[in-house]
Amino acid sequence: MAIVTGKNQRWRVLCAHAFLVVLLVVTLFPLAAVISISLRPGNFANGSLIPREISLEHWKLALGFDVTTADGVVMHPPFPVLRWLWNSVKVATIASALIVAISTTAAYAFARLKFAFKMPILDSMLLLQMFPPVLALVAIYAIFETIGNYVPGLGLETHGGLIVAYLGGVATHVWTIRGYFETIPVEIEECAKVDGASHFQAFFRVLLPMAVPILMVVFVLAFVGTIIEYPVASILLREESNLTLAVGSKYYLADQKYLWGDFAAAAVLSGLPITAVFLAAQRWIVSGLTAGGVKE
Amino acid sequence: MKNIDWRRVAGAGVAALVAVGGLWLAFAIHAAGQPVLALGTLALFAAGLYVYVSRTALAWRYLFPGVVGMLLFVAFPLLYTMWIGFTNYSSTHLLSQERVKAYLLEQTVPDEDHALAFTLHPDAGGLRLVLAPYDAAASAPRFVSAPLPLKGDKVATASMSPLPPDIALAPALGTREVLAHRDALMALKLAMPDRRVLVYTGVHDFGPSAAVWRANPNESLTRLDDLKTYWPDTVAGFYQAADGDRLQPGFKVAVGLANYARMMADKEFRGPFLSIFVWTVVFAALSVAFSLAVGCTLAVLLNWEALRFRTLYRTLLFLPYAVPGFISILVFKGLFNQNFGEINGILDAVFGIKPAWFSDPLLARTMMLVVNTWLGYPYFLVLCTGLLKAIPVDLYEASAIAGARPLTNFFRITAPLIVKPLSPLIISAFAYNFNNFVLVSLLTNGRPDFLNTKIPAGTTDILVSYTYRIAFLDSGQNFGLAAAISTVIFFLVALLSFANLRVAARNAGR
């Protein structure tokens, strides 16, 4: 590096470190605070960031156990957090698996097959995806109310309905997978076809095994996207035992029933696995975020 | 060869099953009085069958699920929302006219004048119900049912037969024991030998029920007890009498541009609507500006090779992005709580103040921006970091020779070079925050509210959270009005998307 460093370079570095450390403190304060609060007894007590007295009551409640306080009062878990976590994981897993299946097949058609209006269809799918579902909540509610009249398993208050509602958002995934398919040489599939494989066999037995990495990426992206989804889940699900984590968590901080400590434990418990998945996938998540905006 | 045949048979079987299932579903929907929906279902199944059975639609076999998913759950809801925006669909106009008519015609009143007293007698396998006229001449006909379980509140019908004179009945239950079976009795219908159906009319009696309404051939309804006639008013969406009296519930009708007119012309509505609109734009713009400023500064700083621990800083500074939004927003909601929150704890200890973050409009808006900046800067940090790597180093070498200072470097070299690739992403971030429903809904729920508004409206509401409120929360579930506002937002989003594509295309062109 040929840049000449000035005399005040050391001061600048020190200032930069100081600035970054202050910013880190501000940034990480909420996360540190919530861990500390989850270990602090009571739901209202104010205390220092490092708790003077460690109490596991909130954690026990979050994990579904009763807690008996010193004066003999038995506290029951306020909300079924583990049930909500299970609902969230169930819905997100099934929805992401279906999303991967649907978008892989569609991406195959866009990457390999010839048909009329190919680019207009792809473009309009991407364009449609720019309208977030939160704008059409009234219609989505009405649609699932109607569906529920005829197919009860897919109506309001069902996880089936929620999963189906998530299946519309495939355009960006189709785009991502199509891009990957196009980096794989067509010749391999053509060889397979020469050897007598059908279209579907060439796709399923030859192309797919080579595309496993991108399928994993899309699965994780879809999983994270559905597990943190709030608006649609909040109108389709209302019963307490049915909620997903994203919808249920807010009830801890209702004005009438403010359970700050219990919320903190539940938040750490449920937030950690999702955060871990997110961090593991951050590279792809960021590139996925930018993919919709710029085209090649 | 055998193998392929077997598969064909299986395929034909599945296709036949799907066809039968589709026909059955369409028929059920049609039978329920929804011909348009039935037609749509039929079309969907027919298209699916054609695609998977025909040999010509090979590409569509792969496309069908994805395209159908997008059409059904993205495109259709958008169009349907626009349509709802032209109707009066709301909690008082929930049903279609036919359904309202059917609902009214089903209404009955118990006819207490012709009621029969009942008694319950224990018997093997349950309780026998015995009906006797009130004016109890001993010779009047009495009726008896088979032993009934009388549990739960499921609707059930019991057929009554004349009481044989020689039957030995156990003593009747007392009033209290009868009351224990009240739910089951209320759901019970008694089919009399003369085909009348009696329903529970009181603690002691069952009686015939009489219809309240009579349908006339000319679409009007007449109330039987006072012979008052109500006509369907297809403009207001009510059954209405000549004297202006309206029947509840109203029904869904198209109201044209009434919802839009209300948005623009109704003074009491326009006031809060306009301020919410302005706040939405300001909120989205400032959120992007602050996140971009913080993210970009950090990216430049962390790109400086003289600095150590850069990877560590970058990883920790990325954390806010990795925590699920619904959790971090709620964490902030708790931290900002006026009395129990940690932030006010610190402010109180240091400055002796306890700001009311959730009840003062200005503070609430400030808090929203602080939280959203915290949530949003890592995105720009990552984006800018990537863009900075693409800037050739010799530019900085040249500027160092010219004796430029870091700020000059940033504004003369770095900023001009990253602004172009960033611009479409800035527009989409703006569009995202324009519709950042999750933040508002979980942090403030729009509160504090404006005072003196007809429909509750919040000072921290943005357009989407406002429509959600109108549609699903405290404001009388006015779906039509909410859908009309959503339609306005569609056009704004479409405009933003168009700008986005134009900018991206221009960048790619150069």
Image (cartoon, coloured by chain):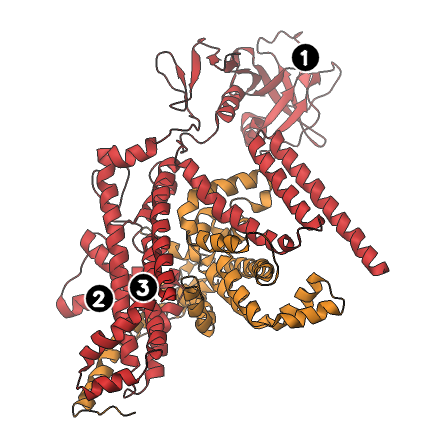
Tell me where residue B63 sits by quadrant. Answer: bottom right
Q: Could you tell which of marks 3 and 2 lies nearer the N-terminus?
A: 2
**Residue at 74% over, 66% down:** A197
Q: Are marks 3 and 1 on the same chain?
A: yes
Would residue B447 appear left or right of B42 to someone viewing this image?
A: left
Q: Nearer the viewer, mark 3 or mark 1?
A: 3
Q: Nearer the viewer, residue B305 or B27?
A: B305
Chain letter for red? B
Quadrant in which the N terminus of chain A is drawn: bottom left
- Give x and y (percent) for residue B81: 43, 40
- Same chain for labels 2 and 1? Say yes or no: yes
According to the picture, the residue beneath numbered tag 2 turns out to be: B345
Between residues B417 and A30, which one lies in front from this camera angle?
B417
Instruction: Say which residue label 3 marks.
Output: B423
Mark 2 or mark 1, which has the lower sequence index?
Answer: 1
The local secondary structure at tag 2 comes to: helix
Callout 1: SS: loop
Say above or below: B57 vs A141. below
- Residue B499 location (% of width, % of height): 34, 55
Mark 3 secondary-structure assignment: helix
Q: Amino acid at mark 2?
A: Gly
Please identify which colour was used for chain A in the image: orange
The residue lying at 32 percent from left, 45 percent from top is: B466
The residues bearing labels 3 and 2 have C-alpha atoms spaced at a distance of 40 Å
Amino acid type of the residue tagged 1 in the rendering: Asp
Above or below residue B175? Residue B68 is below
Which chain letter matches label 2?
B
Amino acid carrying label 3: it is: Ser
Q: To which residue does mark 1 refer?
A: B194
Chain of the residue under the numbered disc 1 shown in the image: B
Asked whether residue A46 appears in the rendered view, the answer is no
In the rendered image, which quarter contains the C terminus of chain A?
Answer: bottom left
